Image (spheres, rainbow, N blue to C red):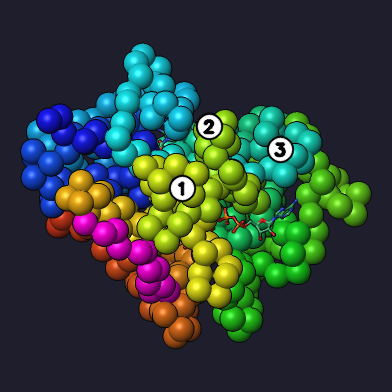
Amino acid sequence: MSKPKVVILGAGYGGLVTAIRLQKQMKASEMDVTLVNKHDYHYITTHLHMPAAGTDHHENARVAIADLIDERKIHFVKSTVSQILPEEKKVVLGDRDLSYDYLVIGLGSETETFGIPGMTEYAMSIKSINSVRFIRQHIEYMFAKSKMEPKRKEYLTFVVGGAGFTGTEFVGELADRIPVLSRTYDVDPSTVQIINIEASPSALPPGLPEDLVEYGMEVMRRKGVQYKLSTPIKECTPDGVILGNGEFIRAGTVVWSGGIRGNSLLQQAGFDVQRGRVKVDECLRSYQYPDVFITGDCSIVMSPEGTPYPANAQIAVQQGYNVARNLLCAVRGRDLKPFAYDFKGTVASLGKGEAVGLLKVKKVKGKFAALLKKVIDARYLYLIGGIPLIWKKMIFKQKTTA
Ligand code: FAD
Ligand code: NAD
C-alpha cells in the first residue's frame, strides 16, 4: 500500500514547524511529506522591522531551509504555488502539480490596503526579505537625494501608515537609525520627520493597557516620532498621503502597515474566507475540506469567548505542533486532538533597549521587556535550529553597515 501523501504549503512559522515536528516524530514508512516554499529559505518575519529600517542585516532574518529540515525525511520543493484545487486534492506549482491525501496550508498573509487608492502602487510594506531590502535602500536613497536637492524637504519626511504592532516596531527602529544616517549623509537630524498616522484614537497595538500605551508613545516621542491619531489615510499618491481631514503630507517615503489579510490563493480555491482567512474547526481543519489543515495567518481560530485570536507567530507555531500531531493521529487511525491556544504574552519592541508588553497578564516595559523580546526570539531560533542557530543569528550575527 502506498504511503499517505502530505503536502505542506509555505515554510513560514506554521508550515515549517509542522514539517520539523513531523520529521522528529514520524517513522519514514508512515507518510510521504513534501514542503513547498517560494524561496529556499525561511524568514523570521518577527525580525523584519529591523532590516527594513537598517538597524540589522537582513541575513540575520533568514535561514536556509536545507539547514532546518532533513531532506531524507521531508522532500523540499522550491516553487511558487499558483493554485489549490481542493476538490481534486491537488496543488498547482509553477512547473508541476502535486496531489495529496492531506494538505497543510501555511501561506501567510498579504497586505490589506482596504482599497485605499494608490496604496498598492506608491507605498511599501514590510512583508519579506526582498521587501525590507527595498525599504532600507529607499530610505538611504532619500538621504542621498536630499543632499542633491536640499530644498525638497519631503525627501526627509517618512510616513508610516498604521500604528499597530508592525507600524510601531518599524517606527521605533527607524527613529534609532536616523542619527546614524544623518551622520553618514551629513544631514541635520532636526530636518528629518517620522510621522506615524493611525486611524484609531490610540497608537500601539490594541489590547495593551492604557498606561503601557502612554509609556510607549512617550518613548517614541522622545525619539522624535510625531503621531497623528484618529486620522485615517484616505489616499496615497506618488508625492505623499492625503488624510481623512483633507490634509496632504508631502513625503518621499510611505510605509504602509495598516493591516493584513490571508493569502488570496485560499479565496481563489473556493474556501469560505473572511478577509482572506479561513475559519477552522477545533482541530485546525477546513470545515469544507476536512483533509485540509490551515495554519497561521491563513486561519481564523476562535477563542472560547467567541472572538478570533490575533494572527501572530506565537499561535502559528503552536498550530504547527498541533497539526503535526494530528497528521500522525490521522495516519495511525487515532482520534485527533483539539487545538488549545496557550497565550504566553505579547511584546512590542520600541527600538533599541525599549519595549512594552504583557507576560501572560503581567505588564512589562523598558529594558526588561526588551530583554524578554530577545528571549522570545532566541526561543524560536532554538526551536527550529537549536543553539547553533542562536549563535549564528543573534550572537555572531552579520553586522549591518551604516
Ligand atoms: P509566514 O511566516 O508569513 O510564512 C508564509 C510562507 O509562505 C513564507 O515562507 C512565504 O514565502 C510562503 N509563501 C507565500 N506565498 C507562497 C506561494 N504562493 N508559494 C509558495 N510559498 C509561498 N508575531 C508574533 O507573534 N510576535 C512578533 O514579535 C511578531 N513580529 C512581527 C514583526 C513584523 C515586522 C511583522 C510583519 C509580523 C510580525 N508578527 C509577529 C506576525 C507574524 O510574523 C505572523 O503572524 C507569522 O509570520 C505568520 O506565520 P505564517 O506561518 O502564517 O506565515
Ligand atoms: P494591525 O491590523 O494589527 O494594525 C494595523 C493598524 O493600522 C491598526 O491600528 C489600524 O487602526 C491602522 N489603520 C488601518 N487603516 C488605516 C488608515 N486608513 N489610516 C491609518 N491607520 C490605519 O496590523 P499589523 O500591525 O501589521 O499586525 C498584523 C498582525 O501581526 C497582528 O495580528 C499582530 O498581532 C501581528 N504582529 C505581532 C507583533 C508582535 O507580537 N510583536 C508584531 C507585528 C505584528
Q: Position of residue 95 (x, y in %)?
A: 36, 14
Image-based side of 345 in relation to 75, left or right:
right
Image-based side of 60 in relation to 1, left or right:
right
Q: Which residue is mark 2?
A: 269
Within 8 Å of ligand 1, the CB of disc 1?
Answer: no
Q: Which residue is mark 3?
A: 119
**Spatial separation of the CA atoms under disc 3 and disc 1:** 32 Å
Q: Position of residue 301 (x, y in %)?
A: 49, 60
Which image quarter holds the C terminus?
top left
Q: Quadrant of residue 376?
A: bottom left
Q: Earlier in the sequence, mark 2 or mark 1?
A: 2
Where is 354 relative to 252, above or below?
below
Tag 2: amino acid: Ala
Queried whether the magenta region covers residue 367, the answer comes back as: no
Q: Secondary structure at mark 2?
A: loop
Where is 194 relative to 208, above or below?
above
Q: Earlier in the sequence, mark 2 or mark 3?
A: 3
Q: Which residue is mark 1?
A: 286
**Spatial separation of the CA atoms under disc 2 and disc 3:** 26 Å
Which image quarter holds the N terminus?
top left
Range of magenta residues: 334-345
Tag 1: amino acid: Ser
Q: Residue at x 57, y 31 (%)?
A: 268
Q: Which mark is residue 45?
A: none
Q: Position of residue 28 (x, y in %)?
A: 8, 39
Q: Secondary structure at mark 1?
A: loop
Queried whether the magenta region covers residue 335, the answer comes back as: yes
Residue 250 visible? The answer is no
Circles 2 and 3, Cβ within 8 Å, touching? The answer is no
